Amino acid sequence: MKIDKILIIGANGQVGSALLPKLRSIYGEEQVIASDLALPSKPLSYFEQVDATDKQSLANLVKKHDITQIYHLAAILSAKGEADPIWAWNVNMQSLLNVLGIGREFKLHKIFVPSSIAVFGSNVPADLTPQDVVLNPSTIYGVSKVATENMLNYYAGRYGLDVRSLRYPGIISYQSLPGGGTTDYAVEIFHTAISGRRFNCYLAEHTTLPMIYIDDAIRATIELMEAPIDQVKVRTSYNLSGLSFTPGELFKQLQQYYPDFECDFVPDFRQYIADSWPNSIDDEDAKNDWGWKVEFDLARMTSEMIAHLSDLEL
Ligand code: NAD
Ligand code: AKB
């Protein structure tokens, strides 16, 4: 049997820079093509520069490499999207329509497109937010993700396309800096603490948000993509839970490693976005359907982040 050939779109970003090496370690380097609008910061094998909003260029790439699976990660995130909502909508929706259209034309075997906790608004239970609730997001990013989920479900039902999706919480990773979200503080605070500087947190001390460590996020993605088709019952997007904490709790955890570390909490416009998102997520469907189980809590995540970032700074 021929092995699937995978294309990652948005491979240089926070998720892509961790997903790419993991997929290559599983399927082989030449089996996974990396692509992005931006050039990679370091030389990268099997990389193609492409604008995902340009359907013809994307189709040429799929044809050239005989692609059978796509991980579509290119998107404009919550905070950046608020600076130019129409641009964010156009990038997020046009790239999605291109990927779904190409999925049909080239009869792709599987497509992964992430959603986000940004689909939820403040009118749903904030604690253990259920899978199926009314979705009234506060950001253009959230609006585009609700539309994305509905398009995925539509293409699965109408055309039988095998599309799979997770509502990622805020991702905490060491491989790259995050790309303009509301949860970015939880990565930036590590870099600041390690470099011995004072941190200016743009969220209030007691703002609880759902987060996930990158290893758990990547494992969830691959487990969902490898699950037998009959186990994938949610075709909008699965709720996914990692851990929940406040900026104050993360700051205290970091002070255990850096006792002189100092932090000011000075909320900006991102506080309004964070206040509209859940505190924690109910991911019973992911657990029941394909066996999802989180591994990283706050203490373990903090120690892993510090170990990895300290290695990189050496
Ligand atoms: P990111 O901003 O770090 O990376 C996105 C990448 O897409 C960038 O490298 C960018 O250059 C590329 N890109 C932008 N426009 C493009 C275009 N037109 N064509 C090709 N590439 C383009 O984002 P991320 O954090 O890696 O997020 C990946 C996916 O996961 C997104 O769909 C995002 O909504 C979702 N997600 C991320 C988080 C998180 O905390 N990181 C949480 C929830 C959901
Ligand atoms: C953001 O903050 O926009 C992202 C997300 C939770 O989707 N990290």
Image (cartoon, rainbow, N blue to C red):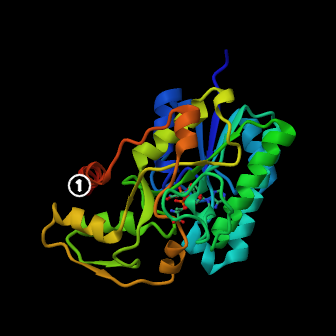
Residue type highlighted by circle 1? Ser
Ligand 1: quadrant of the figure:
bottom right
Image spot of residue 74 (x, y percent) = 62, 56
User: In terms of depth relative to the viewer, which is nearer, 98 or 205?
Assistant: 205
Locate residue 64 relative to residue 207 in the image: left or right: right
Where's the C terminus, which quadrant?
bottom left
- Residue at point 71% right, 43% down? 235
- Residue at point 40% right, 77% down? 203
- Residue at point 46% right, 31% down? 25
Residue 309, quarter of the rendered image: bottom left
Which type of secondary structure does the marked residue at label 1 adopt? helix
User: In terms of depth relative to the viewer, which is nearer, 11 or 266?
Assistant: 266
In this figure, which residue is indicated by the disc labeled 1? 310
Image spot of residue 32 (x, y percent) = 58, 35
- Residue at point 63% right, 60% down? 75
User: In terms of depth relative to the viewer, which is nearer, 123 or 251?
Assistant: 123
Where's the N terminus, which quadrant?
top right
Is residue 99 visible in the rendered image? The answer is: no
User: In terms of depth relative to the viewer, which is nearer, 38 or 105?
Assistant: 105
Reply above or below: 291 against 182: above
Reply above or below: 81 against 253: below
Locate residue 19 relative to residue 193 in the image: left or right: right
Image spot of residue 111 (x, y percent) = 69, 40
Q: Residue furthest left?
A: 259
